Amino acid sequence: MKTILIAFFSLYLVITAGFYFFQDKLIFFPQKFSNGSNSIAKYENLEITIKVGGVTLHGWLLNEGKEKLIIYYGGNAEEVSCTIDGFKSLENYSVLVMNYRGYGKNSGSPSEKYLFGDALEIFDYITDTLHIQPENRVLFGRSLGSGIALYVASMRKVSSIILVTPFDSMRNIVQDKIPIVPVGMILKHPFHSLSYAKDVTCPSLILIAKNDRVIKNKYSINLVKNMGGDCKYFFIENAGHNTIHTYPEYWSLITNHLNE
């Protein structure tokens, strides 16, 4: 029995240490431009670069010149050029989509600290440069990006926020996947959205994939219950975490929210 306990404890320490040292690779999945991607050439006239903390970040600005602006924050495995075609339909809004550090053709490595800091600097730069008033600023975050959008909305004045497949905290998501590890003690990127949700008092739209296997519905609903402003949420039936945007309701609900 003693031998079994020692073996179990040793395995526990190995798993815990493995998570601690490799958690960046388990949380962030930076996507570079694929070999078949023609996003840079196709949308070359929409490209924008913003220098933040010594790193030049790359993205695209659609429909420049509009009074209203949407800033998009992608998922942890998303290279955001894939969203451009969808956003082109929002003709009344300028739309900024920026890749995170380490994503697309950006240098650097992602972390909660850097993603939050970059997001604030990008927000300040683009709203000042385009002269976007607080009542015309919309933040849009998907999956990991929902935590970044909430953080920015808690720190800056915005008119509305849209969250797709959001979560209440990274701790809950990871703990659910690796129950044996004391995640709360060693997690370096907590993305504790509940800490910011209560301070976000603008109207919000939350879209939840009914068949989400990455972020369980209960973690999205827990966030909904703690939002500080008027919050409308919808389940998209049959949708999964990575397929929710392919359902017709996705863009219709977003468009209706923006029109309101």
Image (cartoon, rainbow, N blue to C red):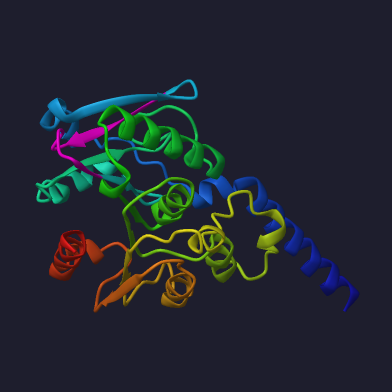
Which quadrant of the structure image shows residue 166? bottom left
Which sits in the foreground, 59 or 105?
Answer: 59
Residue found at x 59% / y 55%: 190
159 vs 107: above or below: below
Corner quadrant of residue 125 = top left
Q: Residue at x 15, y 51 (%)?
A: 86
- Name the residue rendered at 47%, 69% in the picture: 223
In this view, 92 is above or below 128: below
Report whether 33 appears left or right of 176. Answer: left
Position in image of residue 220 (x %, y %): 43, 71
Quarter of the figure that contains the N terminus = bottom right
Horizontal and vertical percent position of residue 256: 16, 65
Q: Nearer the viewer, residue 174 or 164?
A: 164
Q: Is residue 44 above or below residue 160?
A: above
Task: Tell me if 28 is positioned left or right of 38 in this view.
Answer: right
Q: Is residue 101 magenta?
A: no
Q: What residue do we see at 39% from left, 34% from top?
A: 124
Q: Residue 231, how many percent across, how many down?
A: 36, 70
Point out the image quarter for the C terminus. bottom left
Q: Give the image location of residue 212, x and y in percent.
A: 36, 72
Residue 61 in the magenta stretch? The answer is yes
Nearer the observer, 115 or 175? 115
Q: Quadrant of residue 258?
A: bottom left
Q: Which residues are magenta?
A: 56-69
